[in-house]
Amino acid sequence: MSYIQTKRWNVNKSMNLQNKEKYLQEAAQWIKQGNVVAFPTETVYGLGGNALDSDAVKEIFRAKGRPNDNPLIVHIADRAQLDELVTEIPEVAEKLMKAYWPGPLTLIFKASDRVPSDVTAGLDTVAVRMPSHPVARELLLKADVPVAAPSANLSGRPSPTTADHVWTDLAGRIAGVIDGGPTGVGLESTVLDISGQHPVIFRPGGITLEQIAEVAADVELDQALVTEGQAPKSPGMKYTHYAPKGSLTLVRDPDRIHELVASETAQGNRVGVLTTENRQHKYKADFVFACGADGDLAKTAALLYNGLRQFDDHHIDVIYSEVFPESGVGAAVMNRLLKAAGGRIIE
Ligand code: TXA
Ligand code: MG
């Protein structure tokens, strides 16, 4: 692959408004011209290209090294953009959009012929979301095209929550990165299928099951999220994902972690522990990451991917992680941790 000079635009809060305007205009122009550009959203950084330009979409897959059977989410800034992407808008979708758009909720609709099959990976449905991050919104408005955007990481790596994460994975492979500071939610959007009889959660995320149930009481979880060995309906969920380089195992009983750490250390491995501020000081490992405080699941979600990447920065071979409560956004935290661990959990 040839090396591309990757541009970096800083539009952080401290930037003067004129430059910010100029940078976003330029990045939007590049997207219109068929280039791919990484940008912040309220969940994680996305790698965006014109969703209606099949070549731009192919470029996204190439840059990430993403398997092409894994469809992309189309990002829009304006409700009117939805009409050309989908064939029908069920009533429940109207309610959900009213309640949670813009925000971290992706909805799966029946796709129109306008959506290239590269975006949908050949499915007859398309995933659409309206991000709430001001930089994402401004960029989408200026680009004035729907923007296909997966998380802006190399395929298989933890999703990026800062522009530096994007840089580490994709510098030299993409046209540019807009640095808008760290993202807020820290985990990806909830993927909800509303194209069938009942709304079905394919991927837990920023909008919780409880929040969806307030609007759509008949919401269900995809069986693959509940039962082991079931094929997930969301193609992306079948890949080992979000993974640090070291081998990660979840451990239900924190007391067990001490002996596991000691045993791996004795074998000459560099060992890491993922815990919370409450027990951080109890572990004697090469690197201990405190993922928020007990009970503060929003903070845990916001820090998780950054933490997983830090184990790599510390060259950790073996990682043990505590488990987290599965209520609210905790469901998404545990979903990502289990995926990162390839399902390994010591009960
Ligand atoms: O928060 C997010 O959703 C971020 C930001 C950048 O918006 N994007 C993101 O994209 O996480 P990605 O590509 O990493 O994950 C998209 C997920 C994958 O699991 C994919 O399989 C699923 O959505 N998906 C996309 N289109 C689908 C479809 N038509 N049917 C079922 N699943 C779909
Ligand atoms: Mg991803």
Image (cartoon, rainbow, N blue to C red):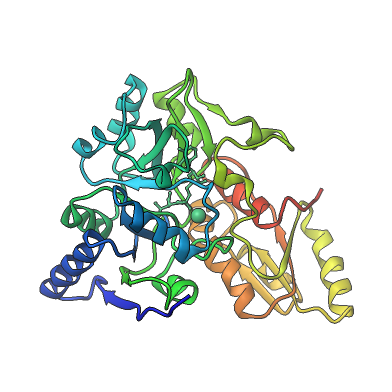
Q: In front: 276, or 228?
A: 228
Q: Residue at x 24, y 32 (%)?
A: 83
Q: Residue furthest left?
A: 18
Q: Is residue 57 left or right of residue 23?
A: right
Q: Is residue 96 left or right of residue 146?
A: right
- Write the residue at 71% across / 33% down: 227
Q: Is residue 160 visible?
A: no
Residue 296 lies left or right of residue 102; in this view the side is right
For the residue pair 279 and 35, the one nearer the viewer reads as 35
**Compared to 5, does 180 lie above or below?**
above
**Compared with residue 151, is residue 63 higher up or lower down, i.e. above or below?**
below
- How far from the left and from the top, in percent, is residue 326? 61, 42
In percent of width and height, residue 239 lies at 63, 51
Tell me where residue 295 appears, x and y as whole percent: 57, 51
| Left or right side of 329 for 216 | left
Q: Is residue 146 visible?
A: yes
Q: How many marks?
A: 0
Q: Residue at x 82, y 48 (%)?
A: 347
Expressed as whole percent of the image width and height from the top left, the position of residue 207 reads 43, 41
Q: 280 or 230: nearer the eye?
A: 230
Tell me: residue 124, above or below residue 279. Answer: above
211 over 18 or under it: above or below: above
